[in-house]
Each structure stands twice: as C-alpha cells, then as structure tokens.
Amino acid sequence: MENKKIGSVLVIGAGIAGIQSSLDLANSGYKVYLLEQTPAIGGTMAQLDKTFPTNDCAMCIVSPKLVDCGRHPNIEIITNAELGKVTGEAGNFKVEVKKNPRYVDEDKCTGCGACTAACPVSIALYPVEKIYVKLKDEDLKKVEPILEKYRGQKGNLMPILQKINREYRYLPEDILRYVSDELNVHLADIYNIVTFYNSFNLEPRGKYIINVCIGTACHVKGAPGLIEALENELGIKVGETTKDKNFTLETARCFGCCGLAPVITVNEDVHGKLKREDIPKIVKHYKSLEEKQDA
C-alpha cells in the first residue's frame, strides 16, 4: 500500500525567494509553513535601497509580498526558529523545528517597543551619543525656528528634515548632527530615514534641477544626445552640480509624457520635443533668470 502524501509544504528561509515560493504554493492550495531563523521575514532584500538592474525601490517590491504572506490563510509563519531533525521520504517527511523564545506574547505584540522600555533587564541597543555641534550664526538662524516649531511634537523628525532639506536644498552633515543632539535622536536613525527617501539629499544640489527622461520613447527620440549637450553646456556630468550651485543634472526613467519625447524638466517646467540645438537656449534662459535675481 502506497504512503499517502501529506498536503503541506515546509519552506526554509523567509527571504524574497522563500516568500514568493510560499505565496505560489499557498495560492495552489497547499498548506505552507514558512520557517525563518531570524525574528522577522524579508531577508536581505528588506535591507536594500535599490534593486539591479531596474533601480526600483527594494521595499516597494517586497512590502506587498510581506503583507500578502502575513495575511494568507494557507501560510503559517514560524520565525525565530531553526530546522531540527528531518525523517521520512519524498512526499512524506517529518520535521522537527526548534523555536527560540521571544519572552512576549506574539498574538498580542504590535511591535510598539514598549516592552523594551519596561523590561527590568537593561538592554542598550545603541546609546544616544552626545555630539554637541556648534553651528555658524547664519545656520542657527535657519535651523532654530524649524526646531522650535516642531519641538515636542510626536513624529517631528520627518517634517524637520523636510524643512531643512528645502532650506538648504540638501541635508548638511553638521546640521544633521545638530538635529541629532537637539532631538536626542541617534544619528544612525536619522541617516536611516534620509538614505531611504529619494526626496532627501546628502550632497548639495542646484537651484535648478534638470532631469532628462531616459525612458524608451525618449531614448529612441534622442535623449542621449540631450544629455551630452547638457553636459557640455553646464560642464558637469549626470549626478553632478555646477560650482555656482545653480544647476544639477539628473536622469529619470519616465515622465509619463511620451508624446512629447524627448523630454527634460527644469524643476517644475517641462520642455518637450527637443533637439540638441535647443539646449543652449534653455540653459541661457535659466541663467538669465538667476542674473536678474542677483541684480
């Protein structure tokens, strides 16, 4: 008599591959046990900023899969556990799993971190370092009003960083150290935020951000030639800023206006159906605007 096959599957490792395999199997009707040695699923991909070769946001890809995996009725996630003894044969395995203690009720845990603060055992994950940065007077005049406006408010770090980024057009290191000291927030936590969001910049950027679309339509219509013309006109390469801090040259994959290809944007202004010979006129226009403001 043949052994009856068990209709369940054990997936070992809850990285992006394990999560996708679990979802595919669960959607096929199998009961899936997803085993992960660390306390949380997501693996290395959850720690990345961008993915190759598309340069897409890693968390934008993996986050929906994390949610689907956690909510799927056919998937049981077993974290903080290790694979033990395996016996049986193909189609009918018996597996022993060693589950390490968490010392909290997982069914009630919301991830708020309150248990860490209330724990009688002192655990310093990373102590907040006192940095004591002394800013220049002109920087204090810009930064202090921003800090005072949001000081004491819950979740104030993000709007403070946004205001400073808008004021300086990037986030200077000494300013971030000063904010870390004033808000009593670890500098590593601040850098976790500013390196995740594309709206924040750690390098100085120009007053005019020139973005060249390199999507398929624009590429075919001559975007590479526009980039070359802009580099020659501005004396910089893609990703760089002119010495006078007036222009920054960047590229983007698609602006959603393929009918105007090839397209560039200068801040909020859109310039479409361009040719190489149009570039000097466009750059000259924005240089003249800057000269009028300086006059």
Image: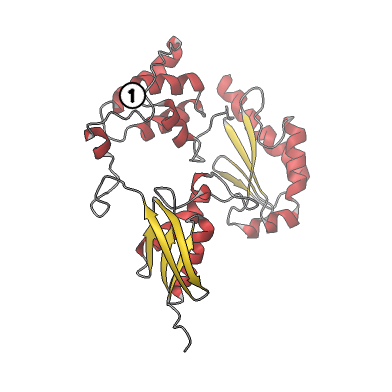
Residue at horizontal 56 percent and vertical 24 percent from the top: 293
Residue 79 coordinates in the image, percent (x, y): 39, 53
Describe the element under mark 1 as helix, strand or loop.
Answer: helix
Left or right? Give the position of 197 relative to 208. Answer: left
Residue at horizontal 63 percent and vertical 33 percent from the top: 248
Q: Is residue 247 above or below residue 144?
A: below
User: 74 or 61, which lies in front?
Assistant: 74
Left or right? Give the position of 260 relative to 28. Answer: right
Camera sees residue 64:
no
Farthest bottom residue in view: 1
Camera sees residue 272:
yes
Q: Quadrant of the C terminus?
A: top right
Residue 24 coordinates in the image, percent (x, y): 49, 70
Q: Which residue is mark 1?
A: 183
User: 60 or 219, which lies in front?
Assistant: 60
Q: Is residue 77 above or below residue 265?
A: below
Residue type at mark 1? Answer: Leu
Residue at horizontal 43 percent and vertical 13 percent from the top: 133
